[in-house]
Image: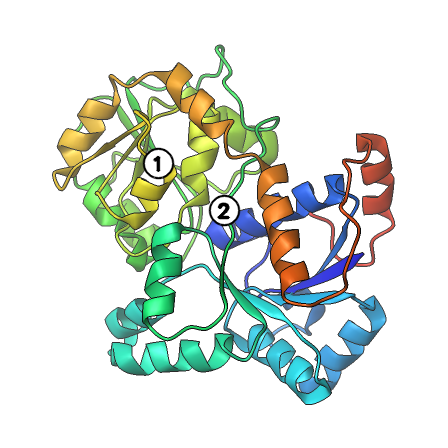
Amino acid sequence: MRILVATDTWLPHVNGVVRTLTAVASGLERLGVDVVFLTPKDMPAGALPGPRRIAARIAELKPDAIHIATEGPIGLAARWYCRSRGRPFTTSVHTRLAEYAAARWSIPPRLGWSFLRWFHNAGRGTMATTEALATELAARGFKRVQRWPRGVDTNLFRPQLNASLGLLRPIFLTVGRLTHDKNLAAFLALDLPGSKVVVGEGPARDELARRCPNAIFLGTKHGGDLARTYAAADVLVFPSRADTCGHALLEALACGTPIAGFPVTATREAAGGAPVAALDEDLRAACLHALALSRTACRAHAETMSAEASARAFLDNVERAGMAPHPAPALVPAADAARAKRKRAAPAIS
């Protein structure tokens, strides 16, 4: 089976959407499913995704099922393609776009939610990564809402006793795209002992660096380098109030690193009632409290949220949406999965 995922955000950008999609693709490959991507890399530099180009690319990839992950130009073009040809598709909600648009461009939230309902209700299923988000979407008039729990690669992201950043401890780390909606200034303004470390890039980087010259900005990290950074930190600080979920939360927990943040949906869902997160409206108090949490408990909690379990849930949603029935997949040997990956026509996942 081949699934095409259309997304407006992709590598080399590192954000929650990209990490979620790469994680589920890895899990799907282990289930014997071929995953290909329609991304900005398929478009000429600086060009909008024209209908003909999108149609040609989808025809070239010959997917059995189509999933639209974002509501940007590529997502809209993929939606048009499916609607014009009567092809079923699924979608997913990753960010609180209506609230972001209201804060950034003063667009009334009701208009943002109206657009999102129009976009997603045309599909056969809208996947939500948390129970709270699924409940909210249904209450806002979204139809066919599907639960898609997140997963993390617990083989890549794992505790490493000797991991070190060579910085004064305790190390308070934040990871993600550096944009104003992530509320990173709230973290960087805190009076904390030790070191503040920021991983990621984005349009707010220069301003944040000016406001907090003592913070260490490490830029973007991937794979093993990112995993070692999590493992070397004492606390993962997640200051966002707007994210629907945070893949960095799961990655940190898998490395044995506890969480500090505000008591919002993303952090509550990641913790799930386990003693792995300090959540407080006083973010400084949360950071200091998190230092006392058990790293062993963090790892144990993350092991209940594997990438394979997330991939199986994604496949179940696709099947329930009536796209390309498939036999129950079995795990395939890693070598076979690697060979299949090399044969893919889509951009490789790094």
Residue 275 point in image, percent of width and height = 30, 24
Sequence-wise, the earlier of marks 2 and 1 is 2
In the rendered image, the quadrant that contains the N terminus is bottom right
In the rendered image, the quadrant that contains the C terminus is top right
Residue 312 point in image, percent of width and height = 64, 45
Q: Residue at x 46, y 82 (%)?
A: 118
Q: Residue at x 14, y 30 (%)?
A: 285
Is label 2 in contact with label 1 (beta carbons under 8 Å)? no
**In the picture shown, does residue 342 fall above or below 318?**
above
Picture mark count:
2
Which three-letter amino acid code belongs to the residue tagged 1? Answer: Gly
Residue 179 seen in this snapshot: yes
**In the picture shown, does residue 139 fall above or below 270?**
below
Q: Please name whichever residue, 115 or 43, is drawn nearer the observer in this view of the structure.
A: 115
**Location of residue 318 (image quadrant):** bottom right
Which label number is shown at residue 96? Answer: none
Which label number is shown at residue 149? Answer: 2
**Location of residue 336 (image quadrant):** top right
Secondary structure under the numbered disc 1 in the rendered image: loop
**In the picture shown, does residue 284 fall above or below 264?**
above
The CA span between labels 2 and 1 is 12 Å
Residue 172 point in image, percent of width and height = 30, 29
Q: Please name whichever residue, 143 or 301, is drawn nearer the observer in this view of the structure.
A: 143
Which three-letter amino acid code belongs to the residue tagged 2? Answer: Pro
Secondary structure under the numbered disc 2 in the rendered image: loop
Residue 109 point in image, percent of width and height = 27, 76
Q: Residue at x 73, y 86 (%)?
A: 85
Residue, far bottom = 84
Q: Residue at x 34, y 76 (%)?
A: 113
| Residue named by callout 1 | 272
Q: Badge 2: how crowded within 10 Å, few (<14), some, or many (20+)?
A: many
Q: Along the horizontal axis of the image, is 202 left or right of 110?
A: right
